Amino acid sequence: MGLLQKAVETYDAMAHRAGQVFEGENEPLAPISHIMARAQIEITLDQDGRFVSARAVDKEAPKIIIPVTEESAGRTSAPCAHPLCDQLGYVSPYDEKKHTLYVDSLSGWANSEYTHPKLQSILTYVRGGTILSDLSGASLIALTPEGGPSDEKLMVCWVVNGLGEKLNGPCWEDRALMDAFVHYSAAKQGDAPPSLCMITGSIDSPAGQHPKGIVPINGNAKLISANDSSGFTYRGRFDDAAQAATVGYIASQKAHSALRWLVANQSAPSGGRTFLCWNPQGIQVPKVTGPMGRKTGTAQRAANPSQYQKQLREALSGWKENLPQSAGVVIAAFDAATTGRLAVTYYNELLASDFLDRLHDWEATCCWENGPYGIQSPSLYQIVNWAFGTPRNGKAETDDRILSQQMQRLVACRVDKVPFPLDIERALVEKASHLLLYEGENRQKLLFTACAAIRKYHCDHLKEEWDMALDKNCSDRSYLFGRLLAIADAIENSTYTDEDRRETNAVRMQKAFTLRPMTTWSALWDKLRPYNKRLAQSKPGLYRYYHGMVDDILNRFSPFDTTLNQKLDDVYLLGYSHQRSYRAEKSDNQETEE
C-alpha cells in the first residue's frame, strides 16, 4: 500500500493542477472520475443543441480529459457507456443497445442537481439522431450499406457555443463541468455501504473497480483487480475480494490519476518496463536511470577528474538547494506480464538527501574518459545495451525482456548501494575485447562504458580506486599489456593516410592478445616491422617516442615472471584506454620534441 499512499499524497499536493494543462507537461492531472482519452472527431453545437460544424482531430493532438463512471473506466468487451464523450458506436443511434446506455448515462447526469448547461445541448442533439448524417455530410466518416458508421470506435468530443462567454468552448477545458461530474459521481458513490479504506485509514465508499491505463504501453493492465470468484476462488485464502483489501473510491481515483500523470510526464520507459522517480510534493528530482547532471543548464566538458568532481558537487548542491531535508523521493518500476495485470517490480522510499547522495556516489565511481566529451558517467541504458546487446550494423540491440530486467538490477545497485554486478562487468569486458566488431563512435562508446564499469566494479568489490589518467608508474601486468596494445595500434595508425586507412593488426589480434599476451605481442611486433620502418623514415621523432615507451614498459616486466603469458584480467582495458587518451592529448610536434 506504500505506493498508493504516496500516490494519494501526491494527488493531494497537486490537486490545484487537476484539469489544467501546464507548459512542459505531456498530459494534465485528471480530476477524480475522469481519464485521459484521444479524440478523433470534434462536434460543435449551439445552445439549442443544433449541429454547427465538425472536424477531424489531428492525430498528434494531445489527449483530452473526459468524465467516466467506475464501470466505464474499466470496460472491456461488454458494452458500458461513458457519460459525455464516447465512441461513435455509443453516440450514434445505429447500435440501439450501446446508444441506450449512452443516453441513459448522459440524461442521468443532465437531470441531476449537478447538471450543467452544456449537457442539455448535447443531450438534445444526441436524441435527434442526426449525428451519422451530419458527419457523413461533412465527409468525416463513411457509412456502411446498412447505414452504420464504418468505424464505430472513433471517439467523439463536444464543443458548445452560444451559452455566454464563461460557458462557451470545449467540454474538456471546462473546469465547472468537471467539478459538476465530480460531485455527481460522489453522490452516486454515497449510496454504497462504507468500509475501511486501507490506503487512507478512513471510512469511505469502497471502489468496486479500479482504473486501468496507468502505463500507456500496458493500457489494459490494472494495478488492483480481483476476478477469481470461481475456480481457484482467491487461491483458497479468502471468500471474497473484500477480505483481501478494501480501497475507498476517492483514494483509488486519486492514486491512479496521480500515477497516470507521473508516468506520462516523469517516467523513463526501458524495454517494456517503466521506471518512475518523484517527490510527492511536486519538487523536481533527477531521473533514476540517467546521469544526475545539472539541475539547470548544460554541463561543460570535464577535461580532468578535478573538473568532473567539481561538476558533480555543483550538481548535487543544485538539486539539494530546493529540496528540504525532510523531503522524500519515491522510486518504482512497473511491468505487465499479461495484458490485464500491472506489477510493481521495484519500490523504494528514501529521503531526498540520501537519494541524491547515492546518485552522486554512483557517478563519482562509475565514470571514465569519453573522448571528446570528457569524463562522464554512462547511463544505465548504455551499460545494459553494450553489455547484452547483439551487434547489428555496428550497433548493439538488446532484447526488451533482458533490457528491462538488467535495468532494474542497476537501478537497485544505484539506489540501494548494492555492489556492481559481476556478470554485467564481465559481459562488458568480453564485448570490449572484440572491438573489431564495432566501428567509429560505437567503438569509443563501448570502450568508455566498459572502463567505467570496470572502475565501478573494482571500487565496490576490491576497494580499489583507479585514476582516470595514465599512470606511468603502474606495474600491474594486465595494465602494462593494455598500454602495449594501444601503442601498437597507434604505431600502425600513424603510417596510414585517410585514403588507405584500415583496421590495425592490434585490433585484429586483440582477443588473442588477452588470452596469450606475451606470445601474441611477439607476433604482433613482427607484423609491425614494415610500419616501424615507414614511421622511422617519415616521422623519426614519433618513432623514437613510441619505441621509448615500449622499452620502458617492457623493462617493467620481470624476466623471471612465469605469469606473463597468462590470460589478462579486466584492467588491461584501463591501460589500453589510458594510453589511447594520452596519445590523443599530444600532437605529433609535442611527441617529436619529447
Image (cartoon, helix red, strand yellow):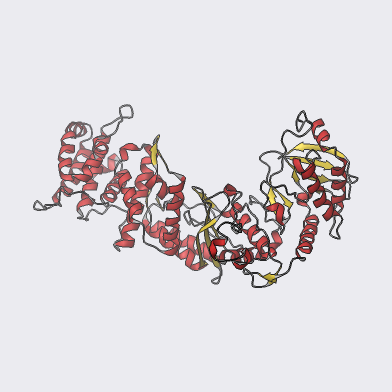
Which residue ends up furthest to the top in the rendered image? 499
Q: Is residue 21 visible?
A: no
Is 316 positioned to the left or the right of 216 in the image?
A: left
Is 165 positioned to the left or the right of 81 in the image?
A: right
Residue drawn at point x = 79 percent, y = 48 percent: 102
Q: In x, y percent, where is residue 307? A: 40, 57
Which residue ends up furthest to the right in the rendered image? 48
Residue drawn at point x = 76 percent, y = 33 percent: 140
Q: Is residue 218 visible?
A: yes
Q: State how many labels appear.
A: 0
Name the residue nearer the viewer: 172 or 230: 230
Name the residue nearer the viewer: 167 or 2: 2
Q: In x, y percent, where is residue 146? A: 78, 30
Q: In x, y percent, where is residue 118? A: 85, 50
In the rendered image of this protein, does residue 306 appear above or below residue 555?
below
Q: In x, y percent, where is residue 439? A: 36, 36
Name the residue nearer the viewer: 532 or 236: 236
